[in-house]
Image (cartoon, helix red, strand yellow):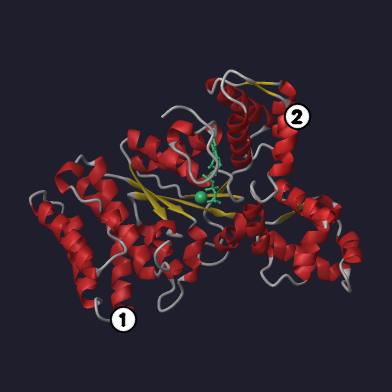
Amino acid sequence: MAVDFKFGGPIEPELFYDREREVGFLIDRLSKIKSGVKHNYALVGPRRMGKSSILRFIELKLARVGIVPVFIDCEGREVAKQVELSLELLLSSWGNSILDAFFDRSGLADKIKVRLRDFIVGTKDKIISALSEVLGRLRALEVKAASSYLELRIEFEKTTSLRAPSPDELVKLLDDTLDLAEELGEETRRHFVLMLDEFQNVSKFRKPIDFLPVFRRHMQVQGRVAYLLTGSNIGMMELLLRRPFGGHIPVEWIGPFEREVAKNFMRERFEALGRDIEDEAIDEIVDFTGGHPAYLNWFGEQCCREVAAGRKIHLKLVLGLEEKIFERDGLMHVFEEELSRVSPKRGKMYSVFIEMAGHDLESPSDISKNVNRSTPSEVILYLRRLEQRGFVRREGRGRYRIVDEMLKRYIRKKIHST
Ligand SMILES: Nc1ncnc2c1ncn2[C@@H]1O[C@H](COP(=O)(O)OP(=O)(O)OP(=O)(O)O)[C@@H](O)[C@H]1O
Ligand SMILES: [Mg+2]
């Protein structure tokens, strides 16, 4: 694939730019599992900052040093298109992803022929026959841990084809799934890194089993599996600081590209795409987006759409796009969705956020003057909640800042145009 701009969703490793410090550090720490030293990490950052893309990139690098990397989307975006993600479905996808990755990295994929990830939703018949097919082919290959896991899964799928699983059955499935990588590792003398994307999502699984304490118990005793958990800071930090983790998993923060990195990214990509661009236009894009990689890509894509290869991109075009990005044919839906997550009820907390953004306010007393019938101490309570959800950050001297500069601009434009 040729180098290009691409807005939205995790990007292919070919399109991946920089993040050298984060990637180098994580590879170094995670691959220590091979010498028996386990480091688990959490990768936390605001939405669309490139967390999943980093996982995809790290996946390749880990495979190169002989580790089996397993990517698991705990939000199950693929699954969720069809049905709501239940604990059972998460566990199926968890186990299937481990087996697929293991077959890939052990050169067995050609013999197994089935990609288990394709059999998570669908009729029980289809799922059972896919699992049985793999089990059949495995018999000749002698990987006991994989066979006994598959036997259990087939049994589970059969008994639950007409009724919901009992709590005991779920506990058994959970234990076996969480042990799978460790057991495969012990049997075949391999090491795994489990990359759990959107990990904060698992905290919703509390009944009939509380997922997190069980997960933590397994994680602690494993010697062949290291974990990399990622999530948007909304929810993720609360989860990591609370029991059962209690702050024991170190956090690597991920922010926007630094100024120089962002400029080089834009310059190099435009050049590779045959576009000439004014220096002022690059500066403008980088300033406006604050180096946020997703928005840099959006500007890149739009510029290339407007200006053919061999022609020049001027500042004027960029200024026009700055208007467009907040409109319906730009990214309005993205910002509206973000806003709806601030506070679905649109009560006082929402007003606090809107007033802050709209009038560039940072101190609780200034904000309280703008929000009807509110006191500074009440505003502080809301600000703390907004902070927990990752929308604002506390600066020195009791001042608060909005994290997403683009969302702030969007609100300001919205307020001042009505
Ligand atoms: N290293 C990178 N190089 C180039 N572009 C990047 C990079 N990282 C992220 N991007 C851009 O940001 C967009 C979002 O990336 P990604 O989906 O990995 O973010 P995320 O933090 O996982 O987002 P979400 O919160 O939606 O899960 C990509 O589509 C791409 O445009
Ligand atoms: Mg992501």
Q: Along the line of sight, which residue is nearer the eye, 336 or 389? A: 336
Q: Amino acid at mark 2?
A: Lys
- Identity of the residue drawn at 21% across and 64% down: 126
Q: Is mark 1 within 8 Å of ligand 2?
A: no
Q: Earlier in the sequence, mark 2 or mark 1?
A: 1
Q: Is residue 194 left or right of residue 230?
A: left
Where in the figure is residue 220, as x and y percent of width and height? 40, 58
Where in the figure is residue 169, as x and y percent of width and height? 28, 76
Q: Nearer the viewer, mark 2 or mark 1?
A: 2
What distance separates the C-alpha of mark 2 from that of mark 1?
63 Å
Q: Amino acid at mark 1?
A: Ser
Q: Is residue 209 left or right of residue 153?
A: right
- Identity of the residue drawn at 30% across and 58% down: 95
Q: Along the line of sight, which residue is nearer the eye, 324 or 196? A: 324
Query: Which residue is identified by label 1?
Result: 166
- Residue 26, above or below 235: above
Does the rendering let one see residue 181? no
Question: Quarter of the image holding residue 411?
Answer: bottom right
Q: Is residue 249 left or right of residue 211?
A: right
**Which type of secondary structure does the marked residue at label 1 adopt?**
loop
- Residue 80, above or below 333: below
Question: Quarter of the image holding residue 242?
Answer: bottom right
Query: Which residue is identified by label 2?
Result: 316
Name the residue at the left extreme: 140
- Identity of the residue drawn at 24% across and 76% down: 161
Q: Is mark 2 within 8 Å of ligand 1?
A: no
- Residue 276, above or below 139: above
**Which type of secondary structure does the marked residue at label 2 adopt?**
helix
Q: Quadrant of the N terminus?
A: top left
Q: Along the line of sight, which residue is nearer the eye, 316 or 250? A: 316
Where is ligand 1, by quadrant? top right
